[in-house]
Image (cartoon, rainbow, N blue to C red):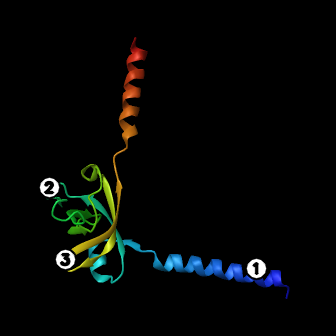
Amino acid sequence: MKKSSILGLVVIAIAISVIIATYSKSSTYGSFSDARQTAGELRVVGQLDKGKELYYDATKDANYFSFFVKDNKGEECKVVFTGTKPQDFEKSEQIVLTGKMTGKEFHASNILMKCPSKYTKDKIEVTEAKAKTAEI
């Protein structure tokens, strides 16, 4: 075999192993009940329970933030995030948490938020402005 053929096979083998390693470490989506049964990390999608308190005191511990989330199946759980509170957290429509259960709490290592679109209001105002212009 030529050296270029061997090098090509080695590059392909490395690429395949990187792809397999990436997908084997990726967490899957589930609910809080799934997280109780899973030892590894899991992604839970839900909504912030705005009726319950958010706890974040930067003077005592800037890396402790806790709140309550209802997952898509309606189960509520206390979430602890070891990091600073994200900006505009209360305005989020949906939250994707990556983490695992520790006792009765879900310890999140990452938080992704879906916030309301700032462009929706502009579209409504533009539509109303066009309607008023059409009446004149």
Q: CA distance from mark 2 to mark 3?
A: 19 Å
Mark 1: few/some/many CA within 10 Å (<14, 14-19, 20+): few
The amino acid beneath tag 1 is Gly
Q: Secondary structure at mark 1?
A: helix
Q: CA distance from mark 3 to mark 1?
A: 51 Å
Q: Tell me where residue 35 appears, x and y as whole percent.
A: 30, 77
Task: Please identify, in this view, whether the residue under mark 1 or under mark 2 is nearer the observer.
Answer: 1
Is 99 placed left or right of 7 in the picture?
left
Q: Tell me where residue 40 appears, x and y as whole percent.
A: 36, 81
Q: Secondary structure at mark 2?
A: loop
Q: Nearer the viewer, residue 39 or 71?
A: 39
Q: Secondary structure at mark 3?
A: loop
Is 135 placed left or right of 78 in the picture?
right
Mark 3: few/some/many CA within 10 Å (<14, 14-19, 20+): few
Which numbered tag is attached to residue 32? none
Residue occupied by mark 3:
104
Residue occupied by mark 2:
51
Q: To which quarter of the image does residue 62 belong?
A: bottom left
Residue occupied by mark 1:
8
Q: Nearer the viewer, residue 91 or 34?
A: 91
For marks 1 and 2 on the same chain, the one whose residue lies earlier in the sequence? 1
Q: Is residue 79 above or below residue 18?
A: above
Say which quadrant the N terminus sits in.
bottom right
Q: Are marks 2 and 3 in contact (CB under 8 Å)?
A: no
Q: Tell me where residue 9 appears, x and y as whole percent.
A: 74, 82
For marks 2 and 3 on the same chain, the one whose residue lies earlier in the sequence? 2
